Image (cartoon, rainbow, N blue to C red):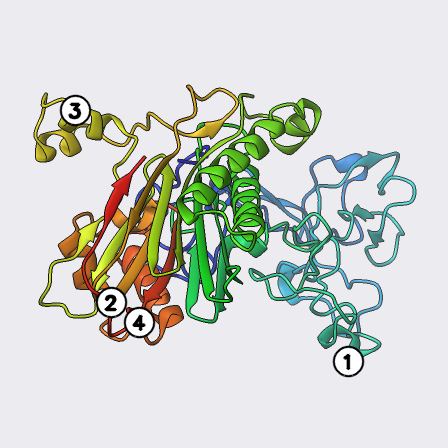
């Protein structure tokens, strides 16, 4: 769904050695950004050097004798060893190579008059006796934050300033305000990469998945009271359209707007089905407003083609013994009875190419969903959408059960109602947060090819409740 970076050919994560699948952009275990893994260096042999001794030919010309430079078969040159300034050990015997300290390399000498010397201001190592034979040293590399701070104050290297985040990749660098490590440059996990919330009897979990660089899903869960004091429970789930600009902002704006609209209309006595319709309209208006902020869009994603932000929406409200669902797009609501001997049901119909083919009788469901166009959506929220057609439906369950509100990141791995019921934990109505975590884990175990979001609402029926009602609009 998201803008794809160049695929990596790595078989394991360079950071944690976790096995990778073809097409992974990020490590599913540690979040390592695989698109910034440097290409392996070309195979250039290292030139081993020793220092020239007194009596070497001026100007770098050929000389003979025990201390003269010798040409290796590869064409490299070795110079006799000389002690490095500030070192106490004796010179390497027999012209053995002098190994540079960590972070420093020896360069080839530059000819400068009768002797050899480095450029002005460059660090140098001098040969014995004549004062000639100085060699330029490369500029020292940036200090390692894991060791440099601790040279004088060991505790400083171990204790970052209060409130400072450490990089999840190198575990040493501090994270700058833009979310990147100041040491290794690794992009840090965003706050939205994994979100969980439990509020009374409703819970939701959202996860980035294993293939995308950010989470473009969003959700909102809330509770309120009707005018008679009875409770109302709300769950909204939105899925950003990745081919659009700023899909993460679109989904967040839609979830917030729809939730706020329901929290305003339900307490004043609006019918839950009408309140859901109004909430979808409010969400659409919120997403449409993002299209007018072109300057910010360019700053947010400078290399992404610019079109209107867009997302899908699905929601559920439990109020007054009714279960009301509303949707635009291909996110879904499932009903899973507590009594697993009774059949589960899918309560929404996708706004998708596959659903249209099935509805018109041009294909059966198996044929339609096997087509590569199956998941192309025909309805969404956004300024470039077709005429907005919010779908709502009202149910009156006659038995307790669980309402599953989810994006296609989950139902792709449990498409039918029976498949969804099979992966819902038996105790999910008592532990909705745990149940949502298990369902997200099911999607990740299946491959996690998309962002995954699910909200669970246990529906309790009073003992005298009987019969069912259904209407759509």
- Please, is residue 131 above or below residue 330 in the view? below
Mark 4 — residue?
429
Q: Which mark is first along the chain, 1 or 3? A: 1
Q: Return the residue found at the far bottom.
A: 155
Where residue 61 appears, as percent x and y from the top left, is 73, 34
Q: Which mark is first along the chain, 2 or 3? A: 3
Please state, as top left, top right, bottom left or bottom right, where the N terminus lies in the image: top left
Residue 26 in sight in this render: no
Q: Which mark is first along the chain, 1 or 2? A: 1
Q: Which mark is first along the chain, 4 or 2? A: 4
Mark 2 — residue?
465
Q: Is residue 360 left or right of residue 402?
A: left
Choose mark 3 or mark 4, whichever is in front: 4
- Which of the 4 quarters of the picture holds residue 85? bottom right
Where residue 126 appears, as percent x and y from the top left, is 84, 54
Quote the CA–CA distance across marks 3 and 2: 38 Å
Where residue 322 appears, as percent x and y from the top left, is 33, 56
Label 1 Cα crowd, 10 Å radius (few <14 / some 14-19 / many 20+): few
Secondary structure of the residue carrying numbered label 3:
helix
Quote the CA–CA distance across marks 2 and 4: 18 Å
Q: Nearer the viewer, residue 472 or 381?
A: 472
Quote the CA–CA distance across marks 2 and 1: 66 Å
Label 2 Cα crowd, 10 Å radius (few <14 / some 14-19 / many 20+): few
Mark 1 — residue?
155
Please state, as top left, top right, bottom left or bottom right, where the C terminus lies in the image: top left
């Amino acid at each position: 769904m998201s803008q794809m970076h160049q695929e990596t050919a790595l078989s394991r994560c360079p950071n944690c050695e976790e096995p990778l699948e073809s097409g992974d952009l990020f490590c599913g275990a540690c979040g390592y950004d695989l698109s910034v893994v440097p290409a392996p260096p070309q195979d250039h042999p290292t030139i081993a050097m020793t220092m020239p001794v007194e009596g070497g030919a001026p100007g770098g010309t050929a000389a003979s004798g025990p201390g003269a430079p010798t040409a290796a078969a590869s064409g490299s040159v070795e110079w006799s060893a000389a002690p490095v300034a500030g070192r106490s050990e004796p010179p390497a015997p027999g012209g053995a190579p002098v190994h540079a300290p960590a972070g420093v390399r020896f360069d080839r000498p530059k000819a400068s008059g009768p002797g050899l010397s480095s450029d002005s201001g460059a660090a140098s190592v001098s040969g014995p006796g004549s004062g000639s034979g100085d060699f330029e040293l490369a500029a020292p590399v940036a200090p390692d934050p894991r060791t440099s701070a601790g040279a004088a104050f060991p505790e400083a290297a171990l204790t970052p300033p209060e409130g400072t985040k450490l990089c999840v990749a190198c575990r040493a660098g501090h994270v700058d305000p833009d979310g990147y490590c100041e040491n290794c440059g690794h992009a840090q996990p965003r706050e939205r990469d994994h979100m969980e919330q439990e509020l009374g009897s409703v819970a939701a979990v959202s996860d980035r998945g294993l293939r995308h660089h950010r989470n473009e899903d969003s959700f909102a869960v809330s509770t309120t009271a009707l005018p008679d004091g009875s409770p109302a429970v709300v769950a909204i789930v939105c899925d950003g359209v990745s081919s659009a600009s700023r899909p993460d902002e679109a989904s967040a704006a839609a979830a917030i707007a729809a939730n706020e609209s329901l929290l305003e209309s339900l307490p004043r006595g609006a019918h839950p089905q009408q309140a859901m319709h109004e909430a979808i309209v409010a969400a659409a208006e919120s997403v449409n407003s993002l299209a007018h902020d072109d300057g910010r869009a360019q700053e947010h994603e400078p290399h992404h083609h610019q079109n209107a932000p867009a997302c899908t929406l699905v929601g559920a409200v439990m109020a007054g013994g009714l279960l009301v669902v509303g949707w635009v797009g291909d996110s879904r609501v499932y009903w899973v009875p507590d009594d697993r001997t009774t059949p589960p049901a899918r309560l929404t119909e996708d706004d998708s190419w596959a659903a249209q083919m099935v509805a018109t009788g041009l294909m059966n469901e198996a044929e339609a969903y096997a087509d590569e166009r199956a998941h192309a959506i025909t309805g969404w929220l956004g300024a470039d959408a077709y005429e907005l057609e919010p779908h709502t439906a009202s149910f009156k369950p006659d038995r307790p059960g669980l309402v599953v509100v989810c994006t296609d990141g989950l139902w792709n791995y449990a498409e039918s109602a029976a498949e969804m019921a099979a992966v819902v934990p038996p105790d999910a109505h008592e532990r909705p947060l745990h149940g949502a975590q298990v369902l997200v884990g099911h999607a990740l175990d299946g491959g996690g090819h998309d962002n995954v979001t699910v909200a669970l609402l246990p529906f309790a029926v009073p003992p005298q409740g009987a019969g069912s009602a259904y209407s759509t609009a």
